[in-house]
Image (tube, rainbow, N blue to C red):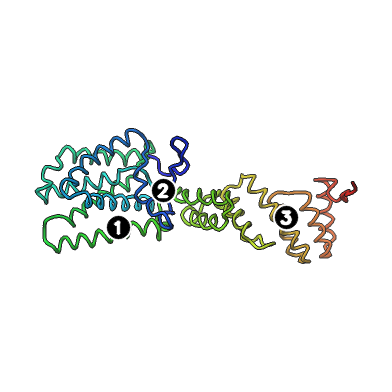
């Protein structure tokens, strides 16, 4: 089952507006429900639609369309929030189907209107299927939204407790637990996701959105999404690199400290990345030159040395020699100048600007 599908498309059209993401807690709350619409394959779709029809028909005939619709919305939002909060989010009706299964299972024992709503074979089927899905996910054979299954079932049981024909205090207690559980799931998906997410790819959603925002020139949005991605997945080198790019764009003229810190973090996580190494060396060289122009040759020496340590260039060695000269460090200056000329004999030559 696909979990992060923002880059998938059907007939050339992106399904991104339907899938679960952090945008559900900003300006697009419908994602908590619409993520149930896309499916990972024909079998996935047929299985879910069939059981939605089996259980949903019972609820609609007994409780009416409005109540059934409300129940489905709660099951969709609760199960989607839990799956996204703890892992990376899922697609499909499975959370709703397991919620309806839990509802009918409980009501078949408490409400005579649902007495024939489910039998032992269906109960065994759902139990076996749930265990099978967990096993295939653990073995990385087939990735299934098991958290959505489990939380959907719990929500279904709690909703049954609210609607069951028993003592009023029991219904009120079930309603209180239902509200608290839904609030907890929404909180896990929004407020506490960085602390509770269990997936190394938990930040993929915001990392992707940050990259898109960066590509489209929306720097503030890029920073916001990438910071959120790094809260969940702090060891993602690509996110650190993109975060550095965004910070560099947002920084005041001549300020490179924050961006360099992000780039260095990216390089520490992925030391073989030549792109990151080149950008760091270039920015350190530029920062050294800016310090040199300000007359702060001590800072310039440190920055040039850092640039050389990251990726040695003739220009960095030449400029290092200049700052050493200004500081009266003749021996160091001569050594840096000789190294610069070894790397590029033309590095110190004047530029011919004649037409």
Q: Position of residue 320 (x, y in %)?
A: 78, 57
* Residue under label 2: 88
For the residue labelled by badge 2, is the local secondary structure a helix, a strand or a loop? loop
Label 1 CA crowd tier, 10 Å (few <14, some 14–19, many 20+):
many
* Residue under label 1: 182
- Is residue 98 shown above or below 226? above
User: Observer-nearest residue: 321 or 45?
Assistant: 45
Residue at horizontal 11 percent and vertical 50 percent from the top: 111
247 lies left or right of 254: left
Asked if the residue under mark 2 is in contact with the one under mark 3, i.e. CB atoms within 8 Å, the reply is: no
**Cα–Cα gap, marks 2 and 1:** 18 Å
Label 3 CA crowd tier, 10 Å (few <14, some 14–19, many 20+):
many
Whichever of callouts 3 and 1 sits on the residue coming sooner in the sequence is 1
Q: Position of residue 284 (x, y in %)?
A: 70, 56
Whichever of callouts 2 and 1 sits on the residue coming sooner in the sequence is 2
354 lies left or right of 79: right
For the residue labelled by badge 1, is the local secondary structure a helix, a strand or a loop? helix
151 lies left or right of 140: left
Residue at horizontal 78 percent and vertical 63 percent from the top: 293
Q: Where, quadrant-wise, is the N terminus in this rendering? A: top left
How many circles with numbers are drawn on the protein? 3
């Amino acid at each position: 089952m696909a979990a992060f599908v923002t880059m998938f498309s059907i007939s050339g059209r992106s399904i991104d507006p339907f899938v679960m993401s952090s945008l559900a807690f900003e300006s697009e709350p419908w994602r908590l429900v619409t993520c149930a619409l896309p499916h990972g394959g024909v079998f996935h779709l047929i299985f879910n639609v069939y059981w939605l029809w089996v259980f949903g028909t019972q609820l609609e005939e007994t409780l009416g369309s409005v109540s059934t619709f409300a129940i489905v919305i709660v099951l969709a939002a609760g199960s989607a929030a839990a799956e996204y909060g703890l892992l990376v989010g899922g697609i499909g009706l499975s959370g709703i189907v397991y919620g309806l299964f839990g509802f009918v299972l409980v009501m078949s024992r408490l409400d005579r209107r649902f007495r024939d709503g489910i039998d032992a074979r269906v109960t065994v089927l759902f139990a076996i299927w749930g265990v099978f899905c967990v096993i295939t996910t653990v073995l990385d054979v087939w990735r299934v939204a098991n958290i959505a299954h489990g939380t959907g079932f719990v929500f279904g049981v709690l909703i049954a407790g609210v609607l069951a024909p028993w003592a009023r205090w029991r219904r009120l207690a079930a309603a209180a637990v239902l509200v608290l559980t839904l609030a907890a799931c929404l909180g896990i998906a929004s407020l506490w996701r960085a602390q509770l997410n269990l997936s190394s790819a938990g930040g993929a959603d915001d990392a992707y959105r940050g990259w898109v925002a960066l590509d489209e020139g929306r720097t503030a949005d890029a920073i916001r999404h990438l910071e959120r991605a790094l809260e969940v997945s702090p060891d993602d080198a690509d996110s650190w690199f993109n975060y550095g790019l965004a910070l560099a764009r947002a920084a005041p003229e001549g300020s490179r400290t924050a961006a360099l810190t992000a780039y260095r973090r990216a390089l520490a996580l992925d030391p073989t990345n030549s792109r990151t190494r080149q950008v760091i060396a270039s920015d350190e060289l530029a920062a050294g030159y800016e310090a040199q122009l300000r007359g702060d040759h001590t800072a310039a020496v440190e920055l040039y040395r850092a640039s050389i340590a990251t990726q040695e260039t003739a220009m960095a060695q030449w400029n290092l020699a200049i700052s050493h000269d200004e500081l009266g460090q003749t021996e160091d200056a001569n050594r840096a100048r000789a190294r610069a000329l070894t790397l590029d004999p033309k590095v110190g030559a004047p530029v011919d600007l004649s037409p």
